[in-house]
Each structure stands twice: as structure tokens, then as C-alpha cells.
Amino acid sequence: MEKTTQFYVVKTGDNLTKIAQRFHVTVDQIMAWNPQIKDRNKIFPDQRIRVAPPTEHDGEGGEYEPFPGSDFFQASVTSPVIEAMGYRLVEEGCSVYSGGPDSTWSSADQKSYANWQRKLGFSGPDADGIPGRTSWNKLHVPAVYE
């Protein structure tokens, strides 16, 4: 059975205290799981935040970042998960980054990921550069903790 990390999309009127209460966690835990949030008083509608710790493990005990869903990969998203993914793409020889990956989703991420999808044998719309569960799980992005 595959475990998944829970994410929440911030709605107008939300704050971290309300979100923490809803998911029975602390604000400090949410801050630890979302290093992209620098100020606990500044979250924004449509921002995607982790509300539970990474829990997916491979069969040998190593920890990998669970698939966050295809809608996670858009220009408005900044996350250390994207940077970790980028470094894995570099390691796999799929990089088109000019200065290395960073934490904001970009066209270089999409092009590099499309190279990964093609390396796996995907083609056409299955190699569009938007991560899907199958290709993501094969990339083995290390779990992001801070």
C-alpha cells in the first residue's frame, strides 16, 4: 500500500493556526515541513503546503519525497521539493539547467523532466515534462527535511 503526504491548498481567510488545528498538528510542525514559509503570518490563497510529514519509504529503508500531484508543478510554486527534484534530474543526466536547479518551478524544470520521461521510454503527451506518479516514483527524489 502506497503512503502519501497530505497537502493543503490555502484558502482566503486561512492562517497557519487554523490549518494546524484542522489537521491536528502544530504550527511549528507545519513550518518545519514547509521551509518555503519564512514568516508564520504570511501565507497566501492557492499556496500549497504540506500538513503531514513525508512518510513514503522505498523497500530498502531509504526515504523519498512522495508524489505531490501533477497540479503542484506550475510557475506559482516554490518548494524545496522542486530543487531536490532538479538535482536528481542533474544526477540522471537529464538537465537543461544553465545555472543549476532552484526551488521555483520553471521551463528548465519542465524540459529537464521531459528528458527524464523520454529516458524512461515515455513519448508524446506522456513526455510533456509534467511529473506523473510513475515517472516521479522512479526518479527517487530524496525526502526534503529542514
Image (cartoon, grey):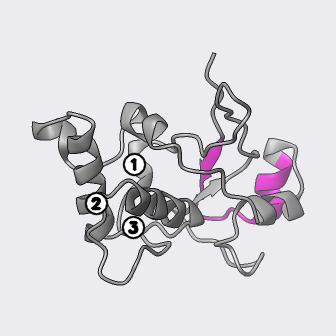
Q: Position of residue 58 (x, y in %)?
A: 64, 31
Would residue 129 be visible to someone looking at this image?
Answer: no
Asked whether disc 2 touches disc 1, contact meaning CB atoms under 8 Å apart, the reply is no
Which one is nearer the viewer's eye here, 98 or 127? 98
Name which of mark 3 and mark 2 comes first in the sequence.
Answer: 3
Q: Nearer the viewer, mark 3 or mark 2?
A: 2
- Left or right of 23? Residue 141 is left
Q: Which residue is mark 1?
A: 71
Which one is nearer the viewer's eye here, 109 or 53? 109
The local secondary structure at tag 2 comes to helix
Q: Nearer the viewer, mark 1 or mark 3?
A: 3
Which one is nearer the viewer's eye here, 76 or 136? 136
Q: Amino acid at mark 1?
A: Asp
Q: Position of residue 119 (x, y in %)?
A: 24, 42
Magenta-tinted stretch:
6-21
Question: Within the image, what quadrant is residue 107 found in?
Answer: bottom left
Name which of mark 1 and mark 3 comes first in the sequence.
Answer: 1
Give residue 112's mark: 2
Q: Which residue is mark 3?
A: 105
- Residue at the left extreme, as displayed: 124
